[in-house]
Image: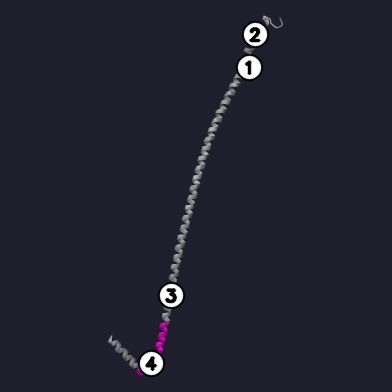
Amino acid sequence: MDLVTPAIGLVFWTTLVFIILLVILRKVAWKPILTAVEEREANITNALRSAEMAKEEMLALKADNDRILREARIERDGILKDAREMKEAIMKEAREKSAEQSEKMLADAHEAIHNQKMAAITELKNQVATLSIEIAEKVLRKELESKEKQQSLVDSLLKEIGNN
């Protein structure tokens, strides 16, 4: 059984070497390992915080994009409405101008027809007057071929003028 139970010296030296090893490891290895673990934990915490901030920024940007998109749609609808109103106003104005021009053209045509009618009537009257004078001249020549007839006509006209 000597093999199973160690001697006191062996236990002492093993314990002493173990304690020295722990002290050396604590000074040399544990501090850098713990520092690395703490740095890694800080990095992970910072990364999680940055990820959360990025997530919040993404949500804010998405909300901003949605708001901008809504505003753009509202502005587009307003522009389309203005364009429709402008188109209707232009078409209405064009219809009114067209109606005014057609009325003016009709009035001008009526006036031109009236002027031509009056010119034709005047021309006809002139022709009738000319023909009447020519007929009267021929009748008077035939009637007044003799000097006595001329004298009696002059006398009757003088009497008529004298009565007035």
Do callouts 1 and 3 mark residues in contact (Cβ within 8 Å)?
Answer: no
Q: Amino acid at mark 3?
A: Lys
| Mark closest to the chain's N terminus, 2 or 4 | 2
Mark 3 lies on a secondary structure that is helix
Above or below residue 57? Residue 150 is below
Q: Which residue is mark 1?
A: 29
Query: What residue is shown with label 4?
Result: 143
Q: Quadrant of residue 133?
A: bottom left
Q: Are marks 2 and 1 in contact (CB under 8 Å)?
A: no
Mark found first going from the N terminus, 3 or 2: 2
List the residue tagged with mark 2.
15
Which mark sits nearer the N-terminus, 3 or 4?
Answer: 3
Residues rendered magenta in the picture: 128-149
Check disc 4: other Cα within 10 Å, few if <14, some if 14-19, many if 20+.
Answer: few
- Which marked residue is nearer to the observer: mark 1 or mark 3? 3
Give the overall secondary structure of the magenta segment: helix
Q: Earlier in the sequence, mark 1 or mark 3?
A: 1
The numbered mark at residue 117 is 3
Of circles 3 and 4, which is in front?
Answer: 3
Amino acid carrying mark 4 in the image: Glu
Q: Are marks 1 and 4 in contact (CB under 8 Å)?
A: no
Q: Residues within 10 Å of mark 3 (few under 14, many from 20)?
A: few
Front of the two marks 2 and 1: 2
